[in-house]
Amino acid sequence: MTRVAVRVLEGPNLYFPRPAAKLTLDLPELLSCPPARFLVLSSNLGVRRSVVGAPDSAARQRALMSLLPPVVRRISREAGITRLGIRVRPGEQPQEVVLACPVRSRGRAHAVGAALGAVLDAAIEDRLDPGVWTQAASTVRTAPADETLEPITPQVPTVSVTGTNGKTTTTRLIAHLAMTAGLRTGWSSTDGVLVQGEVVVNGDYSGPAGARTVLTAPGVELAVLETARGGMLFKGLGIATNDVSVVTNVSADHLGMQGVDTLDQLAEVKAIVTKVTSGWVVLNGDDPRVWAMRATAPAPPWCFSLNPDSPALREAQAVRGRGITVLDGDIVTIDEHGELERLVSVLDVPITFSGLSEQNVANALAGAAAALAAGLSRDAVVEGLRTFAPDVAHNPGRMNIYSLRAATVVLDMAHNEAGLAALLTVASGLRPPGAELWLGLGTGGDRTDEILVNLGEQAGLAADHVLLVHKEHYLRDRNKDEMMGLMREGLARAGVVPIGLCDDEPSALAMLVERSRPGDVVALMTHEDRAALHEWLIEEGGQEDDAASIRRKVLTAAGRHELDTAIDQLWTIEDDRLRIERAAALVAEHPDDARLRYEYAGTFDSAGLEQEALRHYDLAIEGGLSEPFRHRAMIQKASTLRHLGRLDESLAILDALAQERPNSLVVQAFRAFTLHDLSRDADALRDVLRTALSGSTDPDAARYPSSLHRFTEAIQ
């Protein structure tokens, strides 16, 4: 017997730009019956078939798909409905077929499902006669008008934002730009509904309920709606139209769910928001699936691309569209005539992390284009880009960066391969030379096995240490062992063994911070506990990094300093007194800069003023001096202590450094100098030789390994 599951799509959806009934029919009898029987059933239903396919084949499923629309149209005609759009798709199982048609009421949707099921059952049971058709038509015609399906038509400018990654950040950014322009702004996202930054409702409101709440909030002058895949599939859009739509990207996530198995199918879902747009569709020109959406959108395209020579930018201009990109380090817009207008330097847009995060550069381009398309002024957009920070106040849970105990902590809701790649890029870009990256790896169970394995491999290839993190509330019908096993498999592909497993995010962060060293970067994929993690970091003495602090870290990681030129000039001064004075002036201008304090200590050292040098080395180290300057400061401090005759203190520092950096010949050399002054020449020679031989690439060393190591250990 036929089973028909009816889902009412209350707004624009995958099938139609208006409310529809989605009928999922389970037809095992029609899928499996012999071809002759299928031909008889088709004939009884009034449908001529020449090719029916073998039982249980994909061809038979296609035959089923073509069988259903004529049946629905006959029922509709007899019910007095002369025009009816129908879309048919394969279901998730071979015996399933999905049929959709527009409806005006919930009662009519269920009536169509009941009527179709009755006709198919009668055909299968060989009792299909005119009375069955008449009864089916009556079921549809007399369906109760219980609820008119009518999505909200916005009365204020409305921007819909969708995509796999970057939706929430882009939504928040557009809202910030609108508030900067002085508009009372409401927005909905996975974090809830907010008006002017104040939470109206908590929870995941990236679907129709969020849209309704924003658009009915008192006094809202501009609405920004994050629009997720799930809401569009289960209920359709919550609005009839939008002024601007944004699609950030399409990448592998949530595949294998609700009939969406491929990236092309996922792109088709994301494109729903573009098909009801009246103003501009803001599309990622660097993502072919997103850029292709311009073909079915009624509005002109506004292309955003990281590549100023992107063909998509030229294509947009050719159809009188617009573009936005990065040129010579500046965000620029391109009008339909090809004229450029500079907005702001990427370095002055905090969420780009001085250009380090390509994903957030793209989000900034998308957000700026959407704001301009919605009618915001250029000045408001520029000011908003300058003031939207990657902190808890503006963008909680998205690349929030902290300093704690001289380490850097990055919290981000990375949940798929693209999100983890973005997190690892930022974390690696904040890691100074010689420092290590510690990663807390964990995500939700609503990802395919392949994605979970790939996440493990990604982590293993990029991070120095990986800690597995269990997410109890995000298992999504999986179990803990299954989740951890798949990610371990990915780590093994990269030749990595995790350092452990934590059952929650707070304990994972505590472990990672405890094991990290000054200068290291701790990155954690966070989902359920980000508020608690923020509170813990602050209670432990950490602080959120502002844009200036992040910029300094990015430069440091690249082996640079924002005052590199001044530091270089400092060491061209030959006069010791003038060099010290100039260094003192730099420290006075930047009293919290540990790197400048380190250079200041060096000016005393080079002038033979060891006691002053010691004091400033300590201040630099205590001030969070990062690598590679931290261990260099320790070496220089130990050397200074040696010159002052404080040999035991010097040796203690060098012993500790030798444990940290067992292969450093420089550390062993300075240690040997101190051991020599302690009349421990044999120890000095033995340890230096050990280090030199362990790292030697001399082919002769490979010729005599046994003798060299035996003679070294025999030194007394």
Image: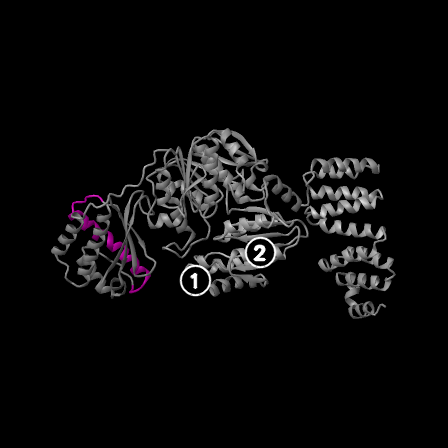
Disc 1 residue type (three-letter): Arg
Name the residue beneath numbered marker 2: 510
Q: Residues within 10 Å of mark 2 (few under 14, many from 20)?
A: some
Relative to residue 403, is residue 613 drawn left or right? right
Q: Secondary structure at mark 2?
A: helix
Stretch in magenta: 54-83
Provide the major secondary structure of the magenta segment. Answer: helix
Look at the image and say whether residue 598 sits in the magenta stretch. Answer: no
Q: Report whether residue 418 is seen.
A: no
In front of the other: 370 or 213: 213
Relative to residue 152, is residue 693 drawn left or right? right
Above/below status of 470 relative to 335: below
Name the residue beneath numbered marker 1: 478
**Which residue appears farthest toward the left when viewing the image?**
131
Residue at horizontal 70 percent and vertical 48 percent from the top = 622
Q: Position of residue 435 (x, y in %)?
A: 66, 52
In front of the other: 19 or 287: 19
Q: Earlier in the sequence, mark 2 or mark 1?
A: 1
Residue at horizontal 16 percent and vertical 53 percent from the top = 136
Label pair 2/1, CB-CB below 8 angstroms: no
User: Could you tell me how far apart the alpha carbons at marks 2 and 1 are, in whole angstroms?
Assistant: 26 Å
In front of the other: 113 or 55: 113
Above/below status of 277 relative to 688: above
Q: Report whether residue 65 is seen.
A: yes
Disc 2 residue type (three-letter): Ala
Tell me how many marks there are: 2
Foreground label between 2 and 1 = 2
Residue at horizontal 73 percent and vertical 52 percent from the top = 631
Residue at horizontal 41 percent and vertical 61 percent from the top = 477
Q: Looking at the rendered structure, which numbered label has been put on residue 110? A: none
